[in-house]
Image (cartoon, rainbow, N blue to C red):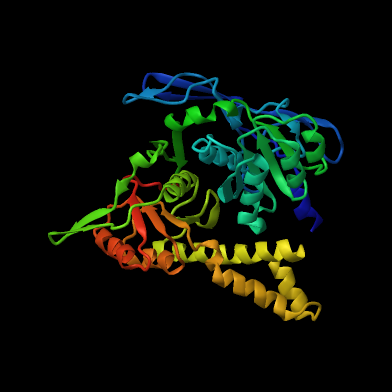
Amino acid sequence: MADIKRMYKTVMDDHFPEKMTIQFGEQTLVYRKRSWKIPDESTGEVIEKGLRYGENPGQESALYELVNGNLVLGGCQFIGPGKGLVSAISEKDMIQSGKHPGKINFTDADNALNILKYLMDRPAAAIMKHNNPSGVAYGATLVEAYDRANLADRIAAFGGCLIVNRAMDKATAGMVSENYLEVVGAPEYEEGVVGILMRRKNLRIVRIPRMDYLAEYRNTRFVDFKSLIDGGIIVQQSSLNAIKTKKDFKKATATYKGKTYTIEREPTEEEYSDMIFGWAVEQGVSSNSVLYVKKGVTVGIGTGEQDRVGVAEIAVFKAYTKYADTLCFREYGIPYKTLEMEIAQGKRNSGTKEEIDRQTQEAHGGIQGAVMVSDAFFPFRDGVDVGIKEGVTAIVHPGGSDRDFESIQACNEAKPKVTMIFTGQRAFKH
């Protein structure tokens, strides 16, 4: 067991080159490998290394920053040098380094920025786990945004990566320090904040360069690489979110066998707001995915499934589970699973759990009144029916299925009627 634990603390040597050059036709991009001088957690000796390891111990890994070259392909100009975010983090930006960072620490931070770049208009927080959000939320203040994002899935947030889009303040830091996180990233930290966060000695406290300019990245593409097991590489442009305002949505309409089907209820302003928010979050969720969002916070997130109705149901299950856990934690200060265990041990009355379960069922796990978001069209109405059954009031998805008319019918038949909007674009992420 000691050997297994040691694996997670070992900083591996890597054999990747100090410089990497990629040529696209006549254009050349030059990257430099990043390393940092960080004290070893056990000996205190300062060690200069790059990433601790890849996705798992035993996998060598390296991070490269673009330092030269300006790629333009087919009229598309990609992000150029001097605009690094995660890849530009220096020792100075690692306010508290904890341990040498690993690949997942940085890819989680990067995908959080991929979501937050669409949410820079007000305070927002994204908590990531295994490159997917566990909770994303707006707030009137940063502390409210963090609290809402954390309670959206308090269980999954444990050991996660938190990125916020405003300078970290004392109120937010105090709440953050009560929980276990691996990484906290912000554009800046107000005076006295770092001392509060450093109560967690292994927490990586990071200042992210250029984050104040993050909104500029929403309209710029990067080159996306995918390596195949045979050594081949697939290259693609990164996707762009086409939805900026409610005017970018399309009213749900479909024609089937000469008959036109149109959604009968227009969205409210609050529903439009949640649709825009939900579609922004969807840009950072692994496909297939379905989300439920309400009042600027994620309620349930279903990720990475093979069928759409299944992921809609998984998101419902997660919403119910997290809602019950939040009620339990607020009332008794313990997780819902701990409550179940203590009831089984005779330490608590079963009535406490029954009341939490009743409130959870009554609120449909917080889904009642929410917006349902899907990264691709619903091939059948069964996925839409899952959300309607739980009380969603609005549904947003790309549209384009041969059976869109069925989904429109389901919304019009619902009591009360559910509204539906098309984005006209898919948001797959693999």
Can I make out residue 51 in this image?
A: no
Picture coordinates of residue 413, whole percent (x, y): 31, 68
94 left or right of 229 in image:
right
60 left or right of 293 in image:
right
From this view, report whether residue 27 is shown above or below residue 312: above
Picture coordinates of residue 376, whole percent (x, y): 37, 53
255 left or right of 246 in image:
left
The N terminus: image quadrant? bottom right
The one of 409 and 184 positioned closer to us in this rendering:
409
The one of 346 and 260 positioned closer to us in this rendering:
260
Q: Quadrant of residue 73?
A: top left
From this view, report whether residue 206 is shown above or below residue 354: above
Q: Quadrant of residue 142?
A: top right
Task: Say which residue appears at 56% left-offset and 72% top-offset.
Answer: 361
Picture coordinates of residue 394, whole percent (x, y): 40, 56
Can I make out residue 219 in this image?
A: yes
20 left or right of 23 in image:
right
Task: Say which residue appears at 27% left-offset and 59% top-offset.
Answer: 404
Picture coordinates of residue 122, whole percent (x, y): 56, 37
Task: Say which residue appears at 34% left-offset and 51% top-offset.
Answer: 421
- State the count of labels: 0
The one of 56 and 181 positioned closer to us in this rendering:
181
From this view, report whether residue 152 is shown above or below residue 99: below
Task: Say which residue appears at 38% left-offset and 42% top-offset.
Answer: 246
- Outermost residue to the right: 43
From this view, report whether residue 92 is shown above or below residue 116: above
The one of 182 and 381 positioned closer to us in this rendering:
381
